[in-house]
Image: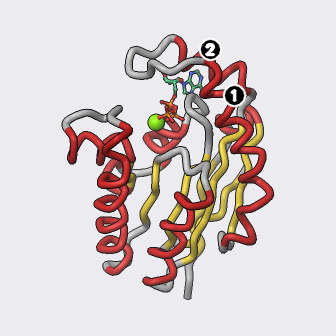
Amino acid sequence: MIIDVPELSLVALVGISGSGKSTFARHHFAPTQVLSSDYFRGLVADDENDQSASADAFDVLHYVAGKRLAAGRLTVVDATNLQTHARAGLVKVAREHDVLPTAIVLDVPESIAWERTESREDRTFGRQVITRMHRDLRRSLKQLSREGFRKIHVLRGVDEIAGAEIRYEKLF
Ligand code: ATP
Ligand code: MG
């Protein structure tokens, strides 16, 4: 599947833990194009998993995203982005810089995400967290367009995710 991404856009990856967002980001984008919530939690709290640092981490992430967009640089946000309020922050930064907010949704079965998460050292939460995220994802799918995302790409299942190819659209 070809994923059209405006050359200058704010790309929000959307997906439950274990859906493969960070893997996808590494595969398709340069490291400096990707702003990950884990990384920013680490920057402000010395611990990528410290959820109590999320507000500060996202403040800084939004700030850096704004600077990048002001300079005309494609920016990818690697976070679950499963909540309307989390996505609203991204839509706001994009609009402030006249940039199109784009969503790439990684929709994998809950059982696969759980299998992957269970075997990770850096994730300690239980299955019920994945189940809750999965419910949030279903709701998110209905809300993205009315929240202001102009392009919404939904990759359903591991094969579609593996076969995805990014194609940049020229703006002018
Ligand atoms: P989180 O929201 O917790 O950061 P994530 O969506 O970023 O999760 P990844 O870290 O990319 O998920 O992937 C979770 C785990 O699954 C990793 O150990 C990764 O190596 C593995 N994984 C990702 N994609 C695949 C795949 N296509 N096939 C097999 N394993 C995969
Ligand atoms: Mg990740």
Q: Is residue 110 above or below residue 138?
A: above
Q: What x and y, as percent, mark residue 107?
A: 71, 39
Q: Which mark's residue is nearer the viewer, 2 or 1?
A: 1
Work out which quarter of the rendered image holds the C terminus and state it: bottom right
Label 2 crowd bin: few (<14), some (14–19), many (20+), radius 10 Å? few
Question: In the drawing, what numbered circle is on residue 46?
Answer: none
The circle drawn on residue 115 is 2
Q: Is residue 156 left or right of residue 59?
A: right
Q: Closest to the observer: 32 or 91?
A: 91
Q: Residue at x 61, y 33 (%)?
A: 19
Task: State the SS at label 2.
Answer: helix
Q: Position of residue 52 (x, y in %)?
A: 34, 41
Quadrant in which residue 136 is drawn = top right
171 versus 47 height, above or below: below
Locate residue 89, reporting x and y percent: 49, 67
Residue at image point 50% right, 11% down:
119
Residue designated by label 1 = 131
90 vs 96: above or below: above
Name the colour scheme.
secondary structure
Which residue occupies 38% across, 75% down? 69
Secondary structure at badge 1 equals helix
Q: Amino acid at mark 1?
A: Thr
The number of numbered badges drawn on the structure is 2
Horizontal and vertical percent for residue 91? 54, 71
Q: Is residue 48 left or right of residue 133?
A: left
Q: Three-letter amino acid code at disc 2?
A: Glu
